[in-house]
Image: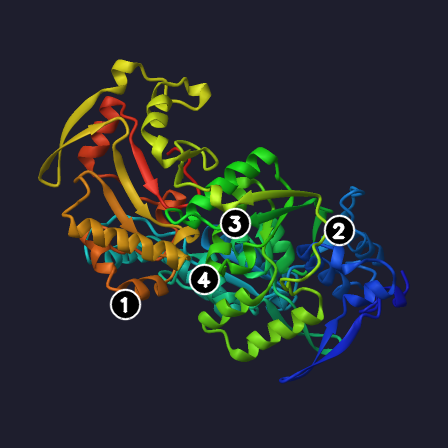
Amino acid sequence: MNTSEQKPDLLEARTELALPIGNVGIYRLARLEDLGWTRLAELPYCLRILLESALRHCDGRQVRPEDVRHLAGWRPEDLPKVEVPFLPARVLLQDFTGVPCVADLAALRAAVARLGGDPQRVNPLVPVDLVVDHSLQVDFYGSADALEKNLALELERNRQRYIFLRWGQKALRNFRVIPPSVGIIHQVNLEFLATCVRLGQDHAGRVAYPDSVVGTDSHTTMINGLGVVGWGVGGIEAEAVMLGQPIGLLLPEVVGVELVGLLPPATTVSDLVLTLTQRLRQLGVVGKFVEFFGPSVPWMNVPDRATLANMAPEYGATMAYFPIDEQTLAYLRQTGRSEEQVRLVERYTKEQFLWRSPDAPLPKYSHVFTLDLSTVEPSLAGPKRPHDRIPLGQMPQAFRRSLQAPVPQRGFGLSAQQADQKVLIHCHGQKAELRHGSVVLAAITSCTTTSNPTLMLAAGLLADKAVRRGLRPPPYVKTSLAPGSRAVTEYLSAAGLLRALEALGFHVVGYGCATCIGNSGPLPEPVAQAIQEHGLVVAAVLSGNRNFEG
């Protein structure tokens, strides 16, 4: 390959954009229309961001002109099975998968040193953030000092890991660690890390480009609610991106999800996302991109969008994208991003056909699925899978059926006589009766819910009403509140609702994934013993995105 084929900006798309902060370079997507390769208005917004990445990196080596042409020429009616490269702007790690990634970088440094090279040359080539959120265990609960005690145990158990991560932050360039007890990776990403548009350097100077991310956690898709392209990958893929290599993906189908109507007064976005998960599982979107549009979308705030995008893995999509619009800018301002950054996002996305206005032409999609929000009803999912939605009013009958259904039919295989079994226990100095279906674990947890102020305030208001009526959970229920960021406890406290949650036993146990990833800690001994000795099928209720048995 000759030098001209390897030069930056092979397609001559770079130009200058005048901004209040000065001129910055951009890679004009309109250049591809000039070449006759695409009609941007017909291309789904999520693909436009992949296209910009390919155009910006087109040097004839990592990204070839034919790769750009494949993306630019995407047509739902004629989708070739070709692989295209994608170079995300950054990488997001949590501590379970992130520690091995840092260990691999340390091993690379050691190998370079053994061969006589400079180990300090081994660094991530793109920005990497590691959020420590997966190590929190709920050992203490139901008391004002639960947070302090759980954090002390976490630091004691993970001392060596955290010392190693501290070394990584000091030694590696382009690597930042968000310490324990700050929040959940995806909520921290939404509220703090993501920028929508980034500024960097290329061969010709300062350049603006869309924020995009891959993360070592399946729910990285939550950031799609902010208009940032991103999805979960394995550790090896994340390391490849950290070292400057592209991710290869087949040209995807893009399913357009049209949202119409308004949610009924008694429902929330939790009911909507469970309904959406059930319907899209039935439709079949595994391995596909989902992009939302329709008359209901402009009125949907970013926290609600993030809740829908978060559960993309549960309905099987690679990602679930909401294009950038006025709601995006409003959220950036609400979460303390600078006005300079907000103006950059607006100016850049409008220039690059990445901004969606209410009168924008509808892109072409591989398939369109319409969901009328007015048909959504209060729901929960269970008992074993997140897409097994049950209307709230049918819950008692549905659970009774599942108790007696055969195991191969996702039941528990109990006889009618066994299903009525009761066990008397003593727990926390009180007598209580356990039976099949007793709720022994209740957790307000997960970035899916705790990133959404409407849902959290609703929980606080419900708790307040329960306290006023003298209601209390039974003594055998392990209760916990694990917010995804400290902002949650601040606004709950400011609203006077944290006190009501604590009165019901929902004290803050920590800031991390906790029960959502199975780190719920042990049940009280009398409860655990009764379950094991009598084979009880007990239940957990949680506000997370998954409900697998365990």
What kind of element bears circle 3?
A: loop
**Residue plotted at (51% across, 59% down):** 299
Q: Position of residue 431 (x, y in %)?
A: 10, 34
For the N terminus, the quadrant is bottom right
Which of the 4 image quadrants contains residue 201?
Answer: bottom right
For mark 1, what is the residue? Answer: 494
Dot label at residue 90: none
Q: Position of residue 400 (x, y in %)?
A: 32, 23
Q: Residues within 10 Å of mark 3 (few under 14, many from 20)?
A: some
For the residues labelled 2 and 3, say whether their Cβ atoms are less than 8 Å apart.
no
Dot label at residue 84: 2
For mark 3, what is the residue? Answer: 261
Seen from the viewer's position, the closer of residues 157 and 266 is 266
Q: Position of residue 257 (x, y in %)?
A: 60, 47
The answer to whether one can see residue 153 in this image is no
Report the mark closest to the observer, 1 or 3: 3
Q: Residue flagged by tag 3: what amino acid is it?
A: Gly
Mark with earlier residue (1, 3): 3
Mark with earlier residue (2, 4): 2
For mark 4, what is the residue? Answer: 188
Seen from the viewer's position, the closer of residues 316 and 467 is 467
Seen from the viewer's position, the closer of residues 431 and 137 is 431
Q: Residue flagged by tag 4: what amino acid is it?
A: Val
Q: Residue flagged by tag 2: what amino acid is it?
A: Val
Mark with earlier residue (3, 4): 4
Which of the 4 image quadrants contains residue 68?
Answer: bottom right
Q: Residues within 10 Å of mark 2 (few under 14, many from 20)?
A: many
Mark with earlier residue (2, 1): 2
Q: Residues within 10 Å of mark 1 (few under 14, many from 20)?
A: few
Report the mark closest to the observer, 2 or 1: 1
Q: CA distance from mark 2 to mark 3?
A: 37 Å
